[in-house]
Amino acid sequence: MVLVYSDDKKLAFELLNKGGMLSEELGEKLTAVIIGKNDQALAQEYISYGAENVFIAETDIDNFKAEEYANYFENIIKETKSETIIIGSNKNGKELASRLAGKLDVGCIIDCTNIYLKDKKLTSERVVYSGNAIAVEQFNSKPAIVTVPSKVFDPLPKDEKRKGNVIEKKFDVEKSESKILKVQEMKSEGVNVEDAEIIVSCGRGFKNKEDIKMVQDLANAIKGKTVGCSRPIAADLKWLSEDHWIGLSGHKVKPKLYIAAGISGQIQHIAGMRDSGIIVAINKDPEALIFKSADYGIVGDLYEILPKLTSAVKEKIG
Amino acid sequence: MNIIVCAKQVIDVSEMKVDPNTKKPILQGVPQKISDIDKNAMEEAIKIKEKHGGKLTVVTIGPSDAKERIKELLAMGADEGVLVSPPEKHDYYVVSNLLAGAIKKIGEYDIILCGEASIDMFSGQAGPRLAGLLGIPQITYAQNLVVEKDKVTADRNMGDTAVTTESSYPVLITVTKEINEPRLPSLMQILGAANKPINEMKADSVADSLYPKVEMLELKGVSMERKNIVYKDNIDESIGKLVDSLAKEGVLR
């Protein structure tokens, strides 16, 4: 069987589409995995997005722990004799896939941006060296575990007429030595940079938290409204919540227009925005790396440039 | 408290060039360094050692020139280095088995520390994979650690949620860049590091012959072609030109 799993249901829908193509080529059944409570509604939803089977591993553990989930998965793989496992690439999914691969001592590829069969072997592409290269890799053994991030594949259109089987099973798995003490929602300002068409971003070049208003003003003027930032602003200074953070360990974005103000252009930041349509850089240092990755740039003080650029844009758009 | 840090030698990605004809990255001749976040792991290990005592060993799977990089970590504060040279073809399966083999040779340990991911590949696979292989608990993406005699508590950044996890020992922990600021060793420490042992091991002495489960077929280049039009002179004129260009590109509506 081809197994598909993510704790993010939307991501699971996307993986089911691709998983369906692979399972058809392999002549195997496509199975969505649920670990948790016996959620029949979710199972039916998976079927309506293309799953032929839904495997529910019933458990009362309420918090995700990679150790215990990997134990469940080991059982599910044995039970279903699955050789292709596709897991959604969020942080939980990545540590689950990696641990599972170590436990089973099998091959694993994280963050695939494409998966396909070549010479009947599972083959994948992923972005490496901070976005400067794509590694094409192939499994020469089974089972094969891959993780795929969101928005790599589109889901199938939902079809509630689709039929499938639901398999329910309880496993007795070893509990982990670790304990979850607290789970808190991250502070979020409800920003979705990944879907934004225009982003104005700020970095270390800003001296005060209040000055970020200049970025917001420009974003509003271009009718983009979305503010992004580099690592120091979200992770170190915490001037903006992490949903604004663009980069290798933040969000990856591809707006039509990306304006980077006061961002030096560290390769980790570039990796998060390199697929943007037009890139504009504003930086006082003419040698700043960001200019190498930009279509247009202005060398100068952002404190002078941003307000003037905002007025100029307003005038142009009218 | 015995601590093992897994550190990887990587190429300095910001110094990497792309062949203008084939668009493939040129990996030869690029300066090497210890992956940034592995240095955060090392810093955290030193802090734990300063508080609780014990032995701090750093393990690297890499070519013999990685010895120079291990010396940097010995200068920072590791007691001993272990360098295992991998077979020519290796994947995460091979590397994690070599790490596990080397760790068995090192002996008793309480904490294994890794960076959340290496900055060249950025998979984040090695840490949790090793934990799975060794069958010990894992704590990933730690931004803060409180180490006590019989347990460790970690604040973890899981994206949408902040999770606090506690574990007994032994445990494998991966850390993020925010956890600390790695120290720069003093000249005395750098000189002192020359006397600290680096134990070089052959792959076949720590694990049975390993053949990768995943093979690299090709490394494709990604071209990043940008217009690179930079206005440097009068700011008012520059802004005028920029707004005109953006309007022509059709991104101002």
Image (cartoon, grey):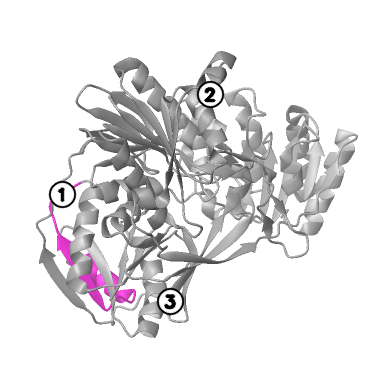
On residue A61, the disc is 1
Q: Secondary structure at mark 2?
A: loop
* Residue type marked 3: Lys
* SS class, disc 1: loop
Q: Quadrant of the C terminus of chain B?
A: bottom right
Q: Is residue A268 above or below residue B215?
A: above
Q: Which residues are magenta?
A: A41-62
Alpha-carbon distance for marks 3 and 2? 48 Å
**Which residue is pictured at 54% across the width and 43% down the height?**
B64
Instruction: Give me the chain letter of mark 3.
Output: A
Identify the residue under disc 3: A121
Q: Nearer the viewer, residue B107 or A271?
A: B107
Residue found at x 80% / y 39%: A298
Q: Is residue B96 visible?
A: no
Q: Is residue A283 visible?
A: yes
Q: CA distance from mark 2 to mark 1?
A: 50 Å
Residue annotated with mark 2:
B194
Whether callout 3 and callout 1 share a subunit is answered yes
